[in-house]
Image (spheres, rainbow, N blue to C red):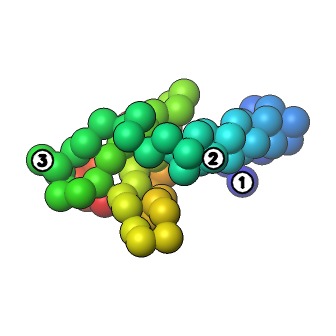
Amino acid sequence: MFSNERFGEARADAYLLALEERFRLIANQPFLGKRIDHIREGYLRNGYANHAIYYTFREEGILIVRVLHNSMDVELHL
């Protein structure tokens, strides 16, 4: 994994745990995200550090569609 090699296992693990915590926050407070209807109708974006979490709503809750690095082309990957 890129992060393990570049930052070390402990730091990469901590980052993943923090992302998981952000997922829980989004699940509990989904409207914290910013609507991105101009890119994809019904989707929201919530940032964490150098990444953006893209998600939408389903009957059972939210669906996290993608987690993209801020340098990635959103329209290409979403």
- Residue 47: % across, % down: 45, 34
Give me the residue at 68% from left, 41% from top. Answer: 21
Q: Residue at x 54, y 28 (%)?
A: 49
Q: Is residue 8 left or right of residue 63?
A: right
Amino acid type, label 1: Met
On the image, the x and y values in percent for residue 2 come to: 67, 48
Q: Is disc 2 in contact with disc 1, using a CB cutoff of under 8 Å? A: no
Question: In the image, what residue type sits under mark 3?
Answer: His
Q: Which residue is mark 2?
A: 24
Residue 1 tag number: 1
**Front-most of 10 and 23?**
23
Label 2 crowding class (10 Å Cα cut-off): few <14, some 14-19, many 20+? few
Checking the image for residue 38, the label placed there is 3
- Mark 1 vs mark 3, foreground winner is 3
Q: Position of residue 37 (x, y in %)?
A: 16, 49
Q: Which of the 4 image quarters holds residue 22?
A: top right
